[in-house]
């Protein structure tokens, strides 16, 4: 064993190790660091990426004992004409829109609230950040308990504790099914979990605004409201957009939280695109080729949306 | 434009005074410079006038209206910050229009006012740029434009030229002063640069250690400093100060130098008392028959003249302005005279200036509008 780091010892075997270390050229050390990373990247990222691209043009099933057969764009054609998929897309769109919008508003509000230094502001900030440090599956499971119609805390809070009538995750009130409640429940949990993230980014943006801008604005006789719209908001905008970008991408591929809460149900009311993909890929039929094609479509959508954001971000930064 | 009055205004942080009780009356259209070393309380005073800093005690009147506890936005004053404080995300146009937009003015009025100040400051070509891309001088012009566009009751400027390089500072100095005279704008200007203060101010308020040392015209502050601090602080180099002892019509100075007390001072100084002689370098003249002498310690060429550093004895080095064409070898003994009209005397105990009895009116600090409990007391003390 060549001890590369041994440099304080004078023992013979180790000093021979030192000699080895000295003989290693910069290039060799560089290779030692780079190759393991590259191999892992290729094995777990690049290969699956390109292999799945290939699979998306075949009828391959991971459980079928046959080699993939090239079928051209048939998978894509099927997917884009499948109404149940469009439904999943619509659900996802609704989820992303409401979830990100609410997180932005709540996160911004929280940031404005704890912006000033006050007694215990560090502790309060940390406590607010706790939700986003938890695992989504754990969050899903305990919110499932909170939503429980019989003993859940949520019903108690909204004044439905006695009757046990309201079942958020089942989208039901008594015997009546109400569309959208289940999705709203999931959105609520996502907002609870990720608003702190928006808050954190906005807070760092707020703290970076120099005091003299507000002093200048006070001298210029701007009202607090005017200051907010013309100084605070534009100054925070770049960081706010980054927060929204991250949250949008995350929300588009949201999976674990929904699985923990509803598993996509009731029916397909909360079946987001990632949940749909999971069902197609790993449950029942194992349609690997088809699900690869679907995964690529999602990837393209995510990249397109991210690019829109980034272009806007650059525009704002370029102006700044 | 307006008058500004400070009545016993003070600022304390805990026990420490940032500004000790201060009285100051600034008349309409006056250009007042608050001058002093850093930490002397001049910026705090300015910020209290603006409302960016609260006062601990005292009153601030703007046009005889008490504004002591009003928010800055309710005071109708403009403030030019040292580092410009332009809004980085707005174009120059929006920066200048900001105070008008904040007041909800109409677009026509904004355009009209904008055009006026833009022409006044010659910054038309900058309107669509962002502050980040401007030079220091242009930034300061934009900051001035933003202050001017509102037509406020008074302008407050906190070292507006401090961040500029020397050349630009000089031309901006002239620009600001010219603008101020044209607009007859009441202006309070903070600087630590005594040359700037001398060049610009109608009156200079010299501050040190939270206390006003003297408030007077540049000429008075220069030729009749109220105390040793002002004597040393104003001028570069400051006033020469040599400690001596008075007896029989003669002030005995170090190095066996004797200076006959000029007429008019006899009643101010008691025999046998220590006294400090003060004179400006340009009030001394090298001459073979001079009454005073010193050894050349250094000579500094200043272009049109040579500044001699003469050692009278011990640490008593005085600066004397001399003819640039003459040579003054180091170590040579040089005789010089001090203009009797220009000699000043100070009390070494309380460090304040002595007054010449015959010409009391000339020596009296005519800036009595400004005083400060400490200096006003010590100021009137004569030495008999």
Image (cartoon, grey):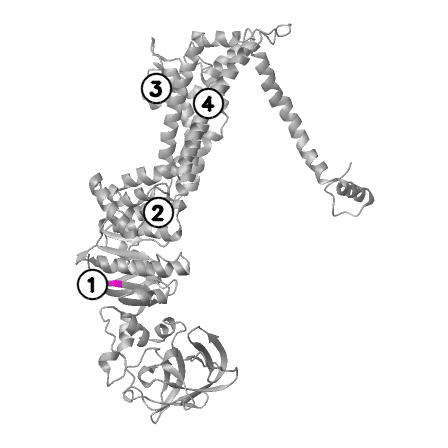
Q: Are marks 4 and 1 on the same chain?
A: no
Q: Residue at x 31, y 37 (%)?
A: A229
Q: Real-space Cα distance between discs 3 and 4?
A: 45 Å
Q: Real-space Cα distance between discs 2 and 3?
A: 56 Å
Which numbered dot is residue B86? 2
Instruction: Give the SS element for disc 1.
Output: loop
Q: Earlier in the sequence, mark 3 or mark 4?
A: 3
Horizontal relation, residue A48 to residue A100: left or right: right
Asked whether residue B204 is drawn in magenta, I would say no
Chain under callout 4: A
Q: Label 1: which residue?
A: B27
Q: Disc 3 vs disc 4: which is toward the camera? A: 4
Q: Earlier in the sequence, mark 1 or mark 2?
A: 1
Magenta highlight range: B25-31
- Decide: is A282 above or below B156: above
Residue A185 locus on image (x, y percent)? 39, 19
Horizontal relation, residue A260 to residue B159: left or right: right
Which of B367 and A128 lies nearest the eye of the viewer? B367
Which of B118 and B241 lies nearest the eye of the viewer? B118
Q: Disc 2 vs disc 3: which is toward the camera? A: 2
Outermost right residue: A12
Horizontal relation, residue A74 to residue B378: left or right: right
Is residue A153 visible to the viewer in this orientation of the structure?
no
Q: Label 3: which residue?
A: A161
């Amino acid at each position: 064993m060549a001890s590369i780091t041994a440099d304080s010892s004078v023992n013979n075997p180790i000093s021979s190790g030192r000699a080895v270390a000295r003989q290693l050229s910069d290039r060799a050390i560089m290779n030692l660091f780079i190759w393991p990373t590259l191999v892992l990247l290729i094995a777990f990222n690049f290969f699956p990426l390109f292999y799945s691209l290939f699979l998306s043009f075949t009828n391959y099933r991971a459980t079928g004992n046959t080699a993939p057969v090239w079928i051209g764009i048939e998978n894509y054609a099927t997917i884009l004409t499948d109404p149940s998929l469009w439904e999943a897309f619509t659900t996802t769109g609704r989820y992303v829109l409401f979830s990100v919008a609410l997180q932005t508003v709540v996160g911004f509000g929280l940031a404005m609230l704890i912006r000033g230094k006050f007694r215990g502001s560090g502790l309060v900030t940390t406590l607010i950040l706790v939700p986003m440090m938890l695992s989504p599956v754990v969050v899903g499971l305990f919110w499932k308990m909170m939503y429980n119609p019989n003993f859940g805390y949520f019903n108690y809070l909204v004044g439905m504790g006695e009757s046990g009538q309201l079942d958020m995750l089942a989208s039901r009130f008594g015997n009546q099914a109400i569309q959208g409640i289940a999705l709203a429940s999931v959105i609520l949990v996502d907002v609870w979990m990720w608003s702190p993230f928006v808050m954190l980014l906005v807070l760092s943006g707020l703290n970076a605004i120099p005091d003299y801008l507000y002093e200048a604005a006070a001298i210029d006789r701007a009202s607090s409201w005017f200051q907010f719209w013309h100084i605070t908001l534009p100054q925070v905008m770049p960081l706010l957009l980054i927060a929204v970008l991250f949250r949008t991408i995350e929300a588009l591929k949201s999976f674990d939280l929904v699985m923990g809460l509803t598993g996509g149900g009731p029916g397909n009311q909360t079946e987001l695109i990632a949940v749909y993909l999971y069902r197609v890929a790993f449950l029942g039929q194992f349609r690997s080729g088809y699900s690869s094609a679907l995964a690529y479509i999602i990837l393209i959508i995510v990249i397109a949306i991210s690019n829109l954001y980034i272009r806007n971000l650059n525009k704002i930064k370029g102006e700044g | 434009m307006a008058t500004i009055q400070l009545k016993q205004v003070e600022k304390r942080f805990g026990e420490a005074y940032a500004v000790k009780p201060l009285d100051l009356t600034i008349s309409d259209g006056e250009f007042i410079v608050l001058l002093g070393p850093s930490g002397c309380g001049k910026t705090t005073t300015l910020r209290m006038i603006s409302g960016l800093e609260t006062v601990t005690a005292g009153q601030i009147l703007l046009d005889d209206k008490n504004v002591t506890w009003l928010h800055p936005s309710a005071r109708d004053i403009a403030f030019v910050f040292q580092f410009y404080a332009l809004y980085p995300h707005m174009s120059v146009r929006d920066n200048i229009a900001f105070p008008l937009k904040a007041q909800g003015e109409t677009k026509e009025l904004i355009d009209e006012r904008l055009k006026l100040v833009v022409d006044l400051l010659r910054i038309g070509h900058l309107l669509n740029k962002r502050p980040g891309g401007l030079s220091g001088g242009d930034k300061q012009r934009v900051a001035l434009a933003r202050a001017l566009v509102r037509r406020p009751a008074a302008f407050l400027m906190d070292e507006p030229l401090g961040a500029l390089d020397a050349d630009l500072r000089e031309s901006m100095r002239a620009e600001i002063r010219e603008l101020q005279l044209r607009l007859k704008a009441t202006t309070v200007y903070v600087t630590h640069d005594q040359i700037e203060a001398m060049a610009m101010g109608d009156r200079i308020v010299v501050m040190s250690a939270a206390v006003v040392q003297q408030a007077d015209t540049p000429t008075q502050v220069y030729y009749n400093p109220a105390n040793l601090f002002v004597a040393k602080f104003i001028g570069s180099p400051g006033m020469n100060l040599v400690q001596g002892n008075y007896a029989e019509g003669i002030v005995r100075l170090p190095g066996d130098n004797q200076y006959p007390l000029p007429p008019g001072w006899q009643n101010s100084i008691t025999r046998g008392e220590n006294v400090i002689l003060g004179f400006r370098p340009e009030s001394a003249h090298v001459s073979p028959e001079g009454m005073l002498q010193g050894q050349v310690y250094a000579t500094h060429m200043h272009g049109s003249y040579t500044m001699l550093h003469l050692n009278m004895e011990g640490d008593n080095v005085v600066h004397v302005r001399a003819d640039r064409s003459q040579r003054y070898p180091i170590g040579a003994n040089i005789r010089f005279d001090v203009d009797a009209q220009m000699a000043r005397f100070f009390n070494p105990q309380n460090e304040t200036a002595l007054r010449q009895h015959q010409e009391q009116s000339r020596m009296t600090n005519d800036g009595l509008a400004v005083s400060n409990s400490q200096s006003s007391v010590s100021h009137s003390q004569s030495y008999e």
